[in-house]
Image: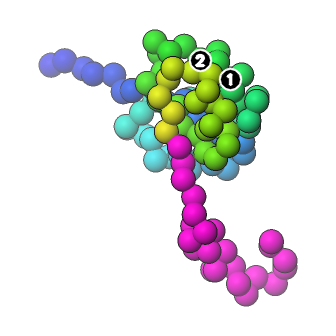
Amino acid sequence: MSHKTLPNLALITPYPALAAVVTEQCTGIFNCHVFHGSLEKAAGIARNLAPDFYDIIISRGGTADYIDRVTKIPVVRILTSALDLLKSLTPLKKHPHKIA
Protein backbone atom coordinates (compact mmCIF):
# COMPACT_ATOMS: atom_id res chain seq x y z
CA MET A 1 0.00 0.00 0.00
CA SER A 2 1.49 3.38 -0.98
CA HIS A 3 1.21 6.34 1.35
CA LYS A 4 0.78 9.82 -0.09
CA THR A 5 1.76 12.68 2.15
CA LEU A 6 -0.61 15.59 2.64
CA PRO A 7 0.05 18.85 0.76
CA ASN A 8 1.83 21.60 2.72
CA LEU A 9 -0.08 24.79 3.27
CA ALA A 10 1.29 28.03 4.71
CA LEU A 11 -1.29 30.24 6.39
CA ILE A 12 -0.14 33.81 6.86
CA THR A 13 -2.61 35.64 9.06
CA PRO A 14 -2.63 39.04 10.74
CA TYR A 15 -4.40 37.69 13.82
CA PRO A 16 -4.19 34.39 15.73
CA ALA A 17 -7.94 33.67 15.86
CA LEU A 18 -8.00 33.05 12.11
CA ALA A 19 -5.26 30.46 12.52
CA ALA A 20 -7.40 28.36 14.86
CA VAL A 21 -10.29 28.26 12.39
CA VAL A 22 -8.16 27.38 9.37
CA THR A 23 -6.00 24.75 11.09
CA GLU A 24 -9.13 23.00 12.37
CA GLN A 25 -10.56 22.88 8.85
CA CYS A 26 -7.24 21.63 7.41
CA THR A 27 -6.99 18.53 9.58
CA GLY A 28 -6.55 15.49 7.36
CA ILE A 29 -6.46 17.59 4.17
CA PHE A 30 -3.27 19.68 4.52
CA ASN A 31 -0.22 19.96 6.73
CA CYS A 32 -0.95 23.49 7.90
CA HIS A 33 1.92 25.77 8.99
CA VAL A 34 0.84 29.06 10.56
CA PHE A 35 2.73 32.35 10.38
CA HIS A 36 1.62 35.73 11.77
CA GLY A 37 2.10 39.00 9.95
CA SER A 38 0.35 41.46 7.68
CA LEU A 39 1.26 43.44 4.59
CA GLU A 40 5.06 43.94 4.35
CA LYS A 41 5.81 41.59 7.25
CA ALA A 42 3.72 38.88 5.58
CA ALA A 43 5.53 39.47 2.29
CA GLY A 44 8.83 38.97 4.10
CA ILE A 45 7.58 35.70 5.57
CA ALA A 46 6.38 34.50 2.15
CA ARG A 47 9.65 35.49 0.51
CA ASN A 48 11.46 33.11 2.87
CA LEU A 49 9.14 30.11 2.38
CA ALA A 50 10.59 27.24 0.36
CA PRO A 51 8.65 26.98 -2.92
CA ASP A 52 9.64 23.33 -3.28
CA PHE A 53 8.06 22.54 0.11
CA TYR A 54 4.84 24.61 0.19
CA ASP A 55 2.02 23.83 -2.21
CA ILE A 56 -0.08 26.92 -1.44
CA ILE A 57 -0.21 29.99 0.77
CA ILE A 58 -3.51 31.17 2.23
CA SER A 59 -4.08 34.74 3.35
CA ARG A 60 -6.69 37.47 3.16
CA GLY A 61 -7.23 40.99 1.89
CA GLY A 62 -4.32 43.28 1.11
CA THR A 63 -1.94 40.89 2.83
CA ALA A 64 -2.62 38.28 0.12
CA ASP A 65 -1.82 40.93 -2.52
CA TYR A 66 1.55 41.70 -0.88
CA ILE A 67 2.35 37.98 -0.68
CA ASP A 68 1.39 37.32 -4.28
CA ARG A 69 3.91 39.93 -5.49
CA VAL A 70 6.93 38.25 -3.85
CA THR A 71 6.48 34.50 -4.31
CA LYS A 72 5.90 31.91 -7.00
CA ILE A 73 3.91 29.76 -4.56
CA PRO A 74 0.19 29.95 -5.48
CA VAL A 75 -1.75 32.27 -3.15
CA VAL A 76 -5.34 31.43 -2.20
CA ARG A 77 -7.29 34.40 -0.89
CA ILE A 78 -9.79 34.20 1.96
CA LEU A 79 -12.66 36.35 0.73
CA THR A 80 -15.06 38.12 3.07
CA SER A 81 -18.18 40.12 2.27
CA ALA A 82 -20.61 42.44 4.00
CA LEU A 83 -22.89 39.44 4.42
CA ASP A 84 -20.13 37.58 6.32
CA LEU A 85 -19.84 40.55 8.67
CA LEU A 86 -23.59 40.73 9.20
CA LYS A 87 -23.79 36.99 9.90
CA SER A 88 -21.11 37.41 12.54
CA LEU A 89 -22.57 40.47 14.24
CA THR A 90 -26.34 39.83 14.06
CA PRO A 91 -26.36 37.19 16.84
CA LEU A 92 -24.70 39.77 19.10
CA LYS A 93 -27.38 42.47 18.63
CA LYS A 94 -28.62 42.14 22.20
CA HIS A 95 -25.16 41.96 23.74
CA PRO A 96 -25.08 44.29 26.77
CA HIS A 97 -21.77 45.94 25.79
CA LYS A 98 -20.69 47.80 22.68
CA ILE A 99 -18.84 45.42 20.38
CA ALA A 100 -18.26 47.54 17.30
User: Which of the 4 quarters of the picture holds residue 63?
Assistant: top right
Circles 2 and 1: CB distance less than 8 Å? Answer: yes
Looking at the rendered structure, the kind of residue marked 1 is: Ile
- The reply to whether residue 34 is visible in this rendering is no
Q: 78 left or right of 47?
A: left
Residue 40, given in percent of the width and then of the height, sits at 76, 30
Q: 15 left or right of 65?
A: right
Q: 88 left or right of 25?
A: right
**Number of residues whose C-alpha sits closer than 10 Å to that of mark 2, classed few (under 14), some (14–19) or many (20 or more):** some
Does the stretch in magenta take in 96?
Answer: yes
- The reply to whether residue 15 is visible in this rendering is yes
Q: Nearer the viewer, residue 21 or 87?
A: 87
Indicate whether 16 appears above or below 68.
below
Residue 56, given in percent of the width and then of the height, sits at 47, 29
- Per the model, the C-alpha gap separating discs 2 and 1 is 7 Å
View extreme (right): residue? 98
Range drawn in magenta: 77-100
From the image, tell me which residue sits under label 2.
49
Looking at the rendered structure, the kind of residue marked 2 is: Leu
Residue 19, given in percent of the width and then of the height, sits at 61, 43
View extreme (bottom): residue? 94
Residue 16, given in percent of the width and then of the height, sits at 70, 44
Element at label 2: loop
Element at label 1: helix
Indicate whether 88 appears above or below 48.
below
From the image, tell me which residue sits under label 1.
45
- Residue at 37% across / 37% down in the picture? 29
Colouring style? rainbow
